[in-house]
Image: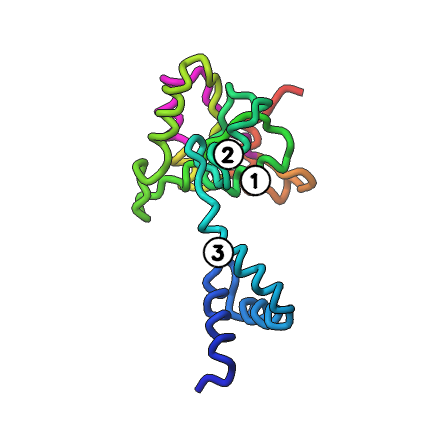
Amino acid sequence: MLYTSPALETLIERLSRLPTIGRKTAQRLALYLLKQPAEEAQLLARAIAELHERVHTCSICANITDDDPCPICCDARRDRSIICVVEEPNDVLTIERTNEFRGLYHVLGGSLSPLEGVGPDELKIRELLDRLRTEGDDAVREIILAMDPNVEGEATTLYLARLLHPIVERVTRIARGIPIGSDLEFADQATLARALEGRTVV
């Protein structure tokens, strides 16, 4: 027997389908929304509806955007000779928050994962190659591969490196090493090995 409102239960069930949201958190969110003025709930519902109506992928870099091309691709101040290849749109947001990278991006839409049926054709790899050929040999001088540090990310990095070396002058990957503020004794062997491999001159 259901001892709560069917409408409330439906919202809890829907919220619990979101990433990292369990049933208890979904219940707290639903009850919080119930306490808000009706106008607030309507604004939230409208924002969710507009997400699918207005947001799409950029035809150049495949990042999420309201406008096509996206603001980054249209920004004349960006260095068009460097493209940073990432897995997902949230990776673009993460890198942009550093205020260190002023080049362009290309979003693959995931990483290679044969066990999950994700091969090269399921990612925006062909679009990247077409983009490089369209922009000309002298337009893009460096591709930075910024994949997640896991098995799938490593496989994607190696696969792309093989494809890109004949096309682009320089193919690099982001460095991986010891996080700032941590102690060497707490670093795992793989991280420490990466840090030694990626050492720089001081």
Q: Residue at position x 62%, y 63% from top?
A: 40
- Tell me the number on the disc at residue 70: 2
- The amino acid marked with disc number 2 is Cys
Circle 3 packing at 10 Å, graded few (<14), some (14-19), many (20+), is few
Label 2, label 1: how far apart the Cα atoms are: 13 Å
Image position of 76 with respect to 42: above or below = above
Across and down, in percent, residue 177 comes to 58, 35
* Residue 128 can be seen, yes or no: yes
Across and down, in percent, residue 175 comes to 55, 30
Q: Residue at position x 49%, y 52% from top?
A: 50
- The amino acid marked with disc number 1 is Leu
**In terms of secondary structure, where does tag 3 sit?**
helix
Across and down, in percent, residue 53 comes to 45, 50
Q: Which residue is mark 1?
A: 93
Image position of 36 with respect to 189: above or below = below
**In terms of secondary structure, where does tag 2 sit?**
loop
Asked where in the image residue 200 lies, by quadrant, the reply is top right
Q: Residue at position x 49%, y 30% from top?
A: 105
Residue 68 lies within the magenta run: no
Mark 2 and mark 3 lie on one chain; the one further toward the N terminus is: 3
Q: Give left or right: position of 123 versus 101.
A: left
Label 2, label 3: how far apart the Cα atoms are: 21 Å
**Start and end of the magenta stretch?**
157-176
Mark 1 and mark 3 lie on one chain; the one further toward the N terminus is: 3
- Tell me the number on the disc at residue 156: none
* Residue 162 can be seen, yes or no: no
**Tag nearer the camera, 2 or 1:** 2
Instruction: Find out whether the residues at labels 1 and 3 contact each other: C-beta distance under 8 Å.
Output: no
Q: Which residue is mark 3?
A: 49
> Which residue is at the front of the view, 145 or 202?
145
Residue 168 lies within the magenta run: yes
